[in-house]
Amino acid sequence: MSTDPSQPGAAPPDPQWYLATQRSAEFVGLRRALRGFIFPMTVAFLAWYALYVFLSAYARGFMTTQLVGNINVALVFGLLQFVTTFLIAWLYARYADRRLDPVADRLRGAAPPAGVEKGASR
């Protein structure tokens, strides 16, 4: 029998294993760690973006202040939005490598082989 679950005749994964994994302390900790990074970082980025929009709309004098040549505060703030996006992506990759991926790998390693029927040997 094929071990690829997308192939006809392959045994479906055991849903009880997924439910047990979802309730496990390790999975709950993984979700908490993920949310502990994503929610604060999202709020911080949205606040930073809202500040940029707010200043662009209501502090035009400040945003049009020339810094060097034709480069003004608004242009610098706009470019910093891109820098912030890449910085957050880099920080998330580091965080995931250290805190999320090892736990996810352990959980994935404990998963039953895909497409193998219960009690069947490989």
Image (cartoon, rainbow, N blue to C red):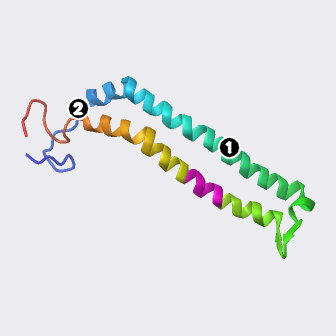
Q: What SS does tag 1 mark?
A: helix
Instruction: Work out whether residue 108 or residue 11 is closer to the camera in this orientation and state it.
Output: 108
Q: Is residue 4 magenta?
A: no
Left or right, 90 with respect to 107, comes to right
Residue 43 picture location, percent across and down: 66, 41
Left or right, 74 with respect to 41, comes to right
Relative to 80, say whether 29 is above or below: above
Residue plotted at (72% across, 45% down)? 47
Residue type, label 1? Ala
Q: Which residues are magenta?
A: 83-89
Tell me if mark 2 has few (under 14), some (14-19) or many (20+) residues whose alpha carbon lies within 10 angstroms of its own. some
Residue 18 picture location, percent across and down: 30, 31
CB contact under 8 Å: marks 2 and 1: no
Instruction: Work out whether residue 2 or residue 100 is closer to the camera in this orientation and state it.
Output: 100
In the rendered image, which quarter contains the N terminus? Answer: top left
Q: Main secondary structure of the magenta part?
A: helix
Could you tell me how many numbered marks the image carries? 2
Left or right, 11 with respect to 37, comes to left
Residue at the disc numbered 1: 44
In the rendered image, which quarter contains the C terminus? Answer: top left
Identify the disc placed on residue 14: 2
Residue type, label 2? Asp
Tell me if mark 1 has few (under 14), some (14-19) or many (20+) residues whose alpha carbon lies within 10 angstroms of its own. few
Q: Say which quarter of the image contains residue 109.
A: top left
Q: What SS does tag 2 mark?
A: loop
